[in-house]
Image (cartoon, rainbow, N blue to C red):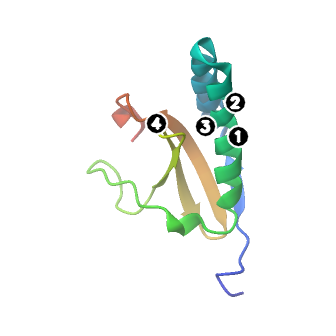
């Protein structure tokens, strides 16, 4: 199958889903509209990974295997962190870029 037309399966981990809920809950305390935008952006960008998962930059950190994770910016302050294995995209985390997320790695 030509990789340009390939459809990848996107699997969002329970942990990543809980992280998204936690960030949205926090945002809703300040702005419900911002929380809704974050969720909608996540849904849209996670869906886009079905076709183009390798378009995003690799997450560079000396503590992880080079090339293991990729990152996708959500709503200017959050990262969707995922990995591609064969025809499957695994969304492993949603983190706030303003916080230390080194523990994740």
Instruction: Determine whether, in the image, residue 16 is placed left or right of residue 79.
Output: right
Q: CA distance from mark 2 to mark 1?
A: 6 Å
Considering depth in this image, is 48 or 6 the residue closer to the camera?
A: 48
Q: Earlier in the sequence, mark 3 or mark 4?
A: 3
Pick the quarter of the image with the C terminus.
Answer: top left
Question: Which quadrant would residue 34 be assigned to in this image?
Answer: top right
Which numbered mark, 1 or 3, is in the foreground of this view? Answer: 1
Q: CA distance from mark 3 to mark 2?
A: 17 Å
Q: State the residue at coordinates (40%, 63%).
A: 67
Q: Earlier in the sequence, mark 3 or mark 2?
A: 3
Q: Earlier in the sequence, mark 4 or mark 2?
A: 2
Q: Which residue is mark 1?
A: 40
- Labels in figure, total: 4
Q: Which numbered marker is on residue 104? A: none
Q: Residues within 10 Å of mark 3 (few under 14, many from 20)?
A: many
Residue 7 locus on image (x, y percent) = 73, 71
Q: State the residue at coordinates (70%, 40%).
A: 40
Q: Secondary structure at mark 1?
A: helix
Question: Which quadrant would residue 36 be assigned to in this image?
Answer: top right
Q: Which residue is mark 3?
A: 16
Q: Residues within 10 Å of mark 4 (few under 14, many from 20)?
A: few
Q: Which residue is mark 2?
A: 36
Residue 59 locus on image (x, y percent) = 39, 54
Pick the quarter of the image with the N terminus.
Answer: bottom right
Pointer 3 and pointer 2: residues touching (CB < 8 Å)? Answer: no
Pointer 2 and pointer 1: residues touching (CB < 8 Å)? Answer: yes
Q: Secondary structure at mark 3?
A: helix
Considering depth in this image, is 30 or 91 the residue closer to the camera?
A: 30
Q: Which residue is mark 4?
A: 77
Q: CA distance from mark 1 to mark 3?
A: 15 Å
Q: CA distance from mark 4 to mark 2?
A: 14 Å
């Amino acid at each position: 199958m030509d990789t340009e037309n390939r459809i990848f399966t996107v699997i969002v981990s329970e942990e990543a889903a809980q992280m998204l809920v936690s960030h949205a809950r926090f945002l809703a305390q300040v702005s419900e509209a911002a929380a809704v935008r974050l969720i909608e952006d996540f849904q849209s960008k996670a869906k886009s990974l079905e076709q183009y998962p390798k378009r995003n930059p690799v997450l560079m950190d000396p503590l992880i295997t080079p090339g293991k994770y990729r990152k996708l910016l959500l709503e200017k302050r959050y990262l969707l962190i995922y990995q591609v294995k064969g025809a499957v995209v695994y969304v492993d985390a949603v983190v706030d870029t303003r916080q230390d997320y080194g523990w994740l790695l």
